[in-house]
Image (cartoon, helix red, strand yellow):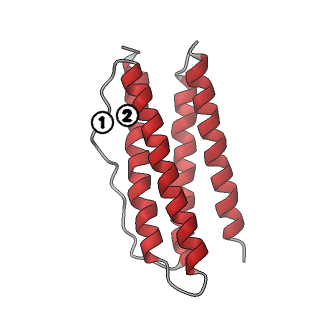
Amino acid sequence: MKNKKLMEKLNEILEMEISGVVRYLHYSLMIKGPNRIPIVKFFRDQATESFDHASIIGEKITSFGGHPTLKVKPVSESNKHDVMDILKESLEHERHSVVLYRELLDLCEDDIALEELARELIRTEVEHIEEVEKMLIR
Protein backbone atom coordinates (compact mmCIF):
# COMPACT_ATOMS: atom_id res chain seq x y z
CA MET A 1 0.00 0.00 0.00
CA LYS A 2 1.16 3.52 -0.78
CA ASN A 3 2.12 5.83 2.05
CA LYS A 4 -0.46 6.82 4.62
CA LYS A 5 -0.47 10.57 3.82
CA LEU A 6 -1.17 9.89 0.16
CA MET A 7 -4.01 7.50 0.95
CA GLU A 8 -5.55 9.99 3.38
CA LYS A 9 -5.39 12.74 0.74
CA LEU A 10 -6.96 10.50 -1.91
CA ASN A 11 -9.79 9.61 0.48
CA GLU A 12 -10.28 13.27 1.36
CA ILE A 13 -10.57 14.04 -2.36
CA LEU A 14 -12.98 11.14 -2.80
CA GLU A 15 -15.20 12.55 -0.03
CA MET A 16 -15.10 15.99 -1.64
CA GLU A 17 -15.99 14.68 -5.11
CA ILE A 18 -18.88 12.58 -3.80
CA SER A 19 -20.20 15.60 -1.94
CA GLY A 20 -19.88 17.48 -5.25
CA VAL A 21 -22.37 15.04 -6.80
CA VAL A 22 -24.87 15.84 -4.04
CA ARG A 23 -24.12 19.57 -4.18
CA TYR A 24 -24.52 19.94 -7.93
CA LEU A 25 -27.60 17.76 -8.15
CA HIS A 26 -29.20 19.86 -5.42
CA TYR A 27 -28.28 23.06 -7.24
CA SER A 28 -29.81 21.74 -10.45
CA LEU A 29 -33.07 21.04 -8.64
CA MET A 30 -33.23 24.53 -7.12
CA ILE A 31 -32.84 26.58 -10.31
CA LYS A 32 -35.89 28.60 -11.28
CA GLY A 33 -36.55 31.24 -13.90
CA PRO A 34 -36.35 31.77 -17.63
CA ASN A 35 -32.75 30.56 -17.98
CA ARG A 36 -33.43 27.38 -16.01
CA ILE A 37 -32.77 24.80 -18.74
CA PRO A 38 -29.13 25.65 -19.61
CA ILE A 39 -28.21 26.25 -15.97
CA VAL A 40 -29.77 22.95 -14.87
CA LYS A 41 -27.77 21.21 -17.60
CA PHE A 42 -24.58 22.94 -16.42
CA PHE A 43 -25.07 21.76 -12.83
CA ARG A 44 -26.05 18.22 -13.85
CA ASP A 45 -22.95 18.04 -16.02
CA GLN A 46 -20.94 19.16 -12.98
CA ALA A 47 -22.58 16.41 -10.89
CA THR A 48 -21.68 13.82 -13.52
CA GLU A 49 -18.11 15.07 -13.65
CA SER A 50 -17.81 14.91 -9.86
CA PHE A 51 -19.03 11.30 -10.05
CA ASP A 52 -16.45 10.55 -12.74
CA HIS A 53 -13.67 12.14 -10.67
CA ALA A 54 -14.79 10.16 -7.60
CA SER A 55 -14.66 6.95 -9.63
CA ILE A 56 -11.15 7.70 -10.91
CA ILE A 57 -9.88 8.54 -7.42
CA GLY A 58 -11.57 5.46 -5.92
CA GLU A 59 -9.93 3.26 -8.53
CA LYS A 60 -6.55 4.83 -7.73
CA ILE A 61 -7.08 4.12 -4.03
CA THR A 62 -7.85 0.45 -4.66
CA SER A 63 -4.99 0.07 -7.15
CA PHE A 64 -2.67 1.29 -4.40
CA GLY A 65 -4.07 -1.32 -2.01
CA GLY A 66 -6.20 1.10 -0.05
CA HIS A 67 -9.85 1.15 0.94
CA PRO A 68 -12.09 3.91 -0.49
CA THR A 69 -13.96 5.83 2.17
CA LEU A 70 -17.72 5.68 2.53
CA LYS A 71 -17.76 9.15 4.07
CA VAL A 72 -19.22 12.14 2.29
CA LYS A 73 -18.17 15.67 3.20
CA PRO A 74 -21.24 17.50 4.53
CA VAL A 75 -22.79 19.91 2.06
CA SER A 76 -23.89 23.05 3.83
CA GLU A 77 -27.30 24.45 2.97
CA SER A 78 -27.31 28.22 2.75
CA ASN A 79 -30.97 28.31 1.71
CA LYS A 80 -29.98 30.92 -0.86
CA HIS A 81 -31.35 29.66 -4.15
CA ASP A 82 -30.76 32.66 -6.34
CA VAL A 83 -28.62 31.60 -9.31
CA MET A 84 -25.88 34.07 -8.41
CA ASP A 85 -25.71 32.78 -4.82
CA ILE A 86 -25.55 29.19 -6.03
CA LEU A 87 -22.78 30.08 -8.48
CA LYS A 88 -20.80 31.73 -5.67
CA GLU A 89 -21.14 28.58 -3.55
CA SER A 90 -20.08 26.53 -6.54
CA LEU A 91 -17.02 28.73 -6.99
CA GLU A 92 -16.00 28.12 -3.37
CA HIS A 93 -16.31 24.37 -3.88
CA GLU A 94 -14.22 24.49 -7.06
CA ARG A 95 -11.50 26.56 -5.40
CA HIS A 96 -11.34 24.09 -2.52
CA SER A 97 -11.05 21.26 -5.06
CA VAL A 98 -7.99 22.89 -6.61
CA VAL A 99 -6.37 23.18 -3.17
CA LEU A 100 -6.89 19.46 -2.52
CA TYR A 101 -5.57 18.42 -5.92
CA ARG A 102 -2.49 20.64 -5.49
CA GLU A 103 -1.88 18.96 -2.13
CA LEU A 104 -2.17 15.61 -3.92
CA LEU A 105 0.37 16.78 -6.49
CA ASP A 106 2.84 17.45 -3.67
CA LEU A 107 2.48 13.83 -2.51
CA CYS A 108 3.05 12.12 -5.88
CA GLU A 109 6.81 11.63 -5.41
CA ASP A 110 8.04 9.62 -8.43
CA ASP A 111 4.60 8.33 -9.53
CA ILE A 112 4.34 10.03 -12.92
CA ALA A 113 0.89 8.58 -13.66
CA LEU A 114 -0.53 9.96 -10.42
CA GLU A 115 1.20 13.29 -11.05
CA GLU A 116 -0.33 13.51 -14.54
CA LEU A 117 -3.76 12.63 -13.11
CA ALA A 118 -3.45 15.32 -10.44
CA ARG A 119 -2.38 17.89 -13.04
CA GLU A 120 -5.28 16.97 -15.33
CA LEU A 121 -7.79 17.29 -12.50
CA ILE A 122 -6.29 20.63 -11.46
CA ARG A 123 -6.64 21.85 -15.06
CA THR A 124 -10.27 20.73 -15.17
CA GLU A 125 -11.12 22.40 -11.86
CA VAL A 126 -9.36 25.64 -12.86
CA GLU A 127 -11.38 25.68 -16.08
CA HIS A 128 -14.55 25.34 -14.00
CA ILE A 129 -13.45 28.25 -11.82
CA GLU A 130 -12.88 30.39 -14.89
CA GLU A 131 -16.27 29.44 -16.32
CA VAL A 132 -18.13 30.20 -13.09
CA GLU A 133 -16.28 33.50 -12.71
CA LYS A 134 -17.47 34.47 -16.19
CA MET A 135 -21.03 33.42 -15.29
CA LEU A 136 -20.91 35.74 -12.26
CA ILE A 137 -20.16 38.81 -14.38
CA ARG A 138 -23.23 40.98 -14.82
Q: Would you say 108 lies left or right of 131 here?
A: left
Q: Residues within 10 Å of mark 1 (few under 14, many from 20)?
A: some
Relative to 115, say whether 136 is above or below: below
Q: Is residue 97 above or below residue 39?
A: above
- Tag 1's secondary structure? loop
Q: Relative to the observer, which residue lies in front, 17 or 104? A: 17
User: Circle 2 — which element?
Assistant: helix
| Horizontal arrangement in the rendering, residue 58 relative to residue 130 (left or right) | left
Q: Given contact means CB atoms under 8 Å apart, are the residues at marks 1 and 2 in contact? A: yes
Q: Residue at x 60, y 24 (%)?
A: 115
Marking on residue 138: none
User: In 3D space, how far apart are the residues under numbered discs 1 and 2 (Cα atoms)?
Assistant: 6 Å
Disc sitting over residue 69 in the figure: 1
Kind of residue at disc 1: Thr
Residue at figure coordinates x 52%, y 48% from the top left: 96
* Dot label at residue 11: 2
Q: Which quarter of the picture shows residue 71? A: top left
Instruction: Decide if residue 100 is on the left or right side of residue 10.
Output: right
Give whichever of 126, 120 is nearer the camera.
Answer: 120
Residue 59, position in %: x, y?
42, 30
Three-letter amino acid code at disc 2? Asn
Front residue of 109 and 24? 24
- Which residue is rendered at x = 36% and y = 24% of the image? 62
**Quarter occupied by the N terminus:** top left
- The C terminus lies in quadrant: bottom right
